[in-house]
C-alpha cells in the first residue's frame, strides 16, 4: 500500500516490514507505537547485527592478536567512521562512545566543566531541558561555585532569544541546550545560540537526543563544541551513545574514568593517558551495541533523513489538525519549528487515565512530566500526554489514537 | 444494618462482578464509574504528608480507628486510580487492624488488574495497599483509639 501525504510518496508499509515488533498485538489490538521520543523500535538489520556479532566474532577489541579480535575491532571502529560521517565531524578521533546522552553530558561536566569552572562563572541552560541536562550542571555548580542561568520559554514553547542574549556576558563559560525538546518538539535555534555564545568565549554543548533522528546534523557547520547522541533514539540499540567534542577541547580535558584501554603506560609513579578517542573509553566497551549502531545509521541514511522528515512532518501536521478537533484539548508546544512530537492536555482529564485507556486500545503514548519538571511547571501542568512519531508510523495509526481519545474522554468526563 | 462482610467475602464479590464483563473496555468503565462515585476528600487532607509515594498520579489517603476498626478515605487526581483505591477501601475499610494486615487481596490478581496495568502503575496500586496495611500496623502497635492523618 502506498500512502500519499502532502504530494509525497512514502511507502510506509514497506518501511514497517523492517520492524518485527510492529506486528505485535497489545491488549488484543494491533500495536500503535507513538512513544518514539522515549525510544525508537529496531529494524531487523540492527537485530541481525547484534546476533551476528555474538554468533560469529565476539571478542574483546584492540590489542588482540587473533582473528576474532581483529574482526571485532574493525567492526567497532567502523561504527566510529559511520558516526563521524553521520554528523559530519572533522576527525574520527572526535567521536567518543558513551552509554548515551546522559553519560555524554556527565562526561563533559566531570572533566571539562569541573576543571575549567570556578566560583562566579555562569552556565546557561534553557527552560526546556531534560533533567539530564540540568542535574549534572547543578552538581558541578555545587563543586565549583558556578551559577546556573536559564533561558526562559514563551507560551508557544520557544526559547525567548532576546532574554538569552541578555544573559550572555564574559562570566558565561558554558552554554548547554537541547537541540529539539523531548516534551514539546521545539527545534531550538542552536546555530544562533552557538555563535552568540562563542562571541563571549563560552563553550557550547548541544543535547542531540531528540534531534539526531530527525534533523541533518553537521557539527562543523553548527560549530558546537560538544554534541551528545543516544543510539536507541536513532533506531539503534540501547546502552550506547556518542559524545562529539572538538579535538582541542578533548585533548585538554582530563580523563573521565580510569581503567584499561584509556592508558598509554601505567606505573605506580606515573600513568600516561592514551590518545583520543581511547582516553575517554575506559574498560571493555559495549562492543555489540556499538557494532549494531552502524547498522541503524546506515539504515536511516539508506532511506534518507530528508525523506523520513517529510513523512514525519506530514504526520505531525495531520495529528495536530486532528487533535485540535477534540473538545477541551490544549496542545503544549506550538513552536513554528518542531520535530514530530505532539504533546497535549485535555481539560478535566488526567494524562494517566488517558494513557491507560489508550494502552487498552493498543496505543502506546507517554504520559507524565517527560523528565522536564521545570518545563511542566512553566506551563502550569503536572504533565502531558505525548505522541511522538517515527518513520514507520502512519496516518491510519493517528486515526486510531484520535478514535481512542474520543472514546476515553467520553468515559472519563 | 446488614451484617458486615469479611474482607474475603468482599473480595469474592468484586471478582464476581468483574466476571460479568467480557472486555477490558467494560472493566475500565466500571472502575471509572467507581472512581467518580468515590466521596471526595476534604481539601484540608490534601497535603503532602497524606500523599502516597510511588504513584504517577497523586493519591491522598487518611485513616482513622473507630471502635477497633480502621476506616479509610482517599482521593486522587486521576479517575482510574480513584476507582482502584475505592475498591481497596470497599474491601478493607471497617475491619480490624489485624484482619487488614492479614488480608491476601488476591482479588487484584483475579480480576487481572495486576497484569493489565503497566508495572509503574501496578506499583502505584501496591503502594496504596502498603500504606493501608502500614496504617493498620500502626493502630495495632499503638493499640488505642486515635485518628491517624
Image: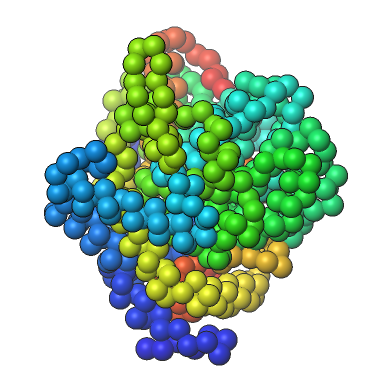
Vertical position of residue A229 compared to residue A29: above or below: above
Q: Nearer the viewer, residue A118 or A29?
A: A118
Q: Residue at x 36, y 49 (%)?
A: A238
Question: In the rendering, at what x and y percent does residue A317 appear?
Answer: 61, 76
Colour mode of the rendering: rainbow
Location of residue A151 by image quarter: top right
Question: In the rendering, at what x and y percent does residue A220 appear?
Answer: 60, 57
Q: Residue at x 25, y 59 (%)?
A: A49
In the rendered image, the quadrant that contains the N terminus of chain A is bottom left
Q: Nearer the viewer, residue A98 or A358?
A: A98
Vertical position of residue B77 compared to residue A7: above or below: above
Question: In the rendering, at what x and y percent does residue A210 appear?
Answer: 54, 56
Residue A201 in view here = yes
Q: Nearer the viewer, residue A95 or A18?
A: A95
Question: In the rendering, at what x and y percent does residue A275 appear?
Answer: 42, 36
Location of residue A13 by image quarter: bottom left
Residue B76 in view here = no
In the rendered image, the quadrant that contains the C terminus of chain A is bottom right
Q: Nearer the viewer, residue A27 or B30?
A: A27
Q: Residue at x 54, y 32 (%)?
A: A253
Q: Residue at x 24, y 38 (%)?
A: A63
Amino acid at each position: 500500500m502506498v500512502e500519499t501525504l502532502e504530494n509525497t510518496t512514502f511507502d510506509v508499509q514497506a518501511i514497517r516490514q523492517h520492524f518485527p515488533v510492529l506486528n505485535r498485538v497489545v491488549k488484543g489490538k494491533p500495536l500503535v507505537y507513538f512513544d518514539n521520543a522515549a525510544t525508537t523500535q529496531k529494524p531487523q538489520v540492527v537485530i541481525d547485527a547484534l546476533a551476528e556479532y555474538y554468533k560469529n566474532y565476539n571478542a574483546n577489541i584492540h590489542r588482540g592478536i587473533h582473528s576474532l579480535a581483529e574482526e571485532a575491532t574493525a567492526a567497532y571502529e567502523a561504527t566510529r567512521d559511520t558516526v563521524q560521517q553521520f554528523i559530519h565531524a572533522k576527525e574520527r578521533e572526535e567521536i567518543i562512545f558513551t552509554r548515551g546522552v546522559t553519560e555524554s553530558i556527565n562526561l563533559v561536566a566531570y572533566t571539562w566543566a569541573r576543571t575549567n569552572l570556578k566560583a562566579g562563572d555562569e552556565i546557561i541552560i534553557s527552560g526546556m531541558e531534560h533533567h539530564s541536562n540540568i542535574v549534572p550542571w547543578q552538581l558541578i555548580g555545587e563543586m565549583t561555585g558556578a551559577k546556573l542561568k536559564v533561558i526562559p520559554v514563551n507560551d508557544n514553547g520557544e526559547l525567548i532569544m532576546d532574554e538569552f542574549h541578555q544573559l550572555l556576558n564574559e562570566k558565561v563559560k558554558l552554554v548547554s541546550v537541547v537541540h529539539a525538546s523531548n516534551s514539546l518538539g521545539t527545534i531550538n535555534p542552536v546555530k544562533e545560540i552557538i555563535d552568540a555564545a562563542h562571541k563571549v568565549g563560552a563553550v557550547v554543548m548541544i543535547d542531540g537526543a531528540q534531534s539526531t533522528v530527525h534533523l541533518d546534523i553537521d557539527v562543523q557547520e553548527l560549530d558546537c563544541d560538544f554534541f551528545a547522541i543516544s543510539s536507541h533514539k536513532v533506531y539503534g540499540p540501547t546502552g550506547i551513545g556518542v559524545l562529539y567534542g572538538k579535538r582541542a577541547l578533548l585533548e585538554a580535558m582530563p580523563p573521565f574514568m580510569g581503567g584499561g584501554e584509556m592508558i598509554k603506560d601505567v606505573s605506580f609513579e606515573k600513568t600516561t593517558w592514551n590518545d583520543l578517542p581511547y582516553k575517554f573509553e575506559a574498560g571493555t566497551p559495549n562492543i555489540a551495541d556499538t557494532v549494531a549502531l552502524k547498522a541503524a545509521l546506515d539504515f536511516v541514511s539508506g532511506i534518507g533523513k530528508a525523506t523520513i522528515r517529510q513523512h514525519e512532518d506530514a504526520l505531525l501536521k495531520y495529528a495536530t489538525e486532528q487533535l485540535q478537533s477534540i473538545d477541551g484539548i490544549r496542545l503544549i508546544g506550538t513552536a513554528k519549528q518542531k520535530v514530530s512530537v505532539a504533546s497535549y492536555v485535555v481539560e478535566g482529564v488526567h494524562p494517566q487515565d488517558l494513557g491507560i485507556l489508550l494502552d487498552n486500545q493498543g496505543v502506546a503514548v507517554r504520559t507524565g512530566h517527560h523528565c522536564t519538571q521545570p518545563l511542566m511547571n512553566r506551563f502550569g501542568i503536572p504533565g502531558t500526554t505525548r505522541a511522538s512519531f517515527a518513520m514507520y508510523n502512519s496516518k491510519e495509526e493517528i486515526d486510531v489514537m484520535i478514535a481512542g481519545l474520543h472514546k476515553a474522554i467520553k468515559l472519563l468526563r | 444494618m446488614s451484617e458486615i462482610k469479611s474482607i474475603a467475602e468482599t473480595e469474592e464479590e468484586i471478582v464476581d462482578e468483574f466476571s460479568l464483563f467480557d472486555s477490558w473496555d467494560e472493566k475500565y468503565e466500571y472502575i471509572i464509574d467507581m472512581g467518580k462515585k468515590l466521596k471526595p476528600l476534604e481539601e484540608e487532607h490534601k497535603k503532602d504528608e497524606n500523599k502516597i509515594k510511588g504513584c504517577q498520579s497523586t493519591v491522598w489517603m487518611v485513616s482513622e480507628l473507630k471502635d477497633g476498626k480502621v476506616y479509610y478515605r482517599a482521593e486522587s487526581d486521576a479517575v482510574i486510580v480513584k476507582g482502584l483505591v475505592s475498591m481497596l477501601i470497599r474491601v478493607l475499610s471497617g475491619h480490624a487492624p489485624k484482619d487488614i494486615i492479614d488480608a491476601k487481596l488476591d482479588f487484584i490478581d483475579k480480576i487481572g488488574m495486576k497484569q493489565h496495568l503497566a508495572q509503574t502503575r501496578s506499583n502505584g496500586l501496591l503502594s496504596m495497599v502498603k500504606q493501608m496495611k502500614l496504617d493498620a500496623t500502626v493502630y495495632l502497635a499503638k493499640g488505642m483509639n486515635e485518628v491517624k492523618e
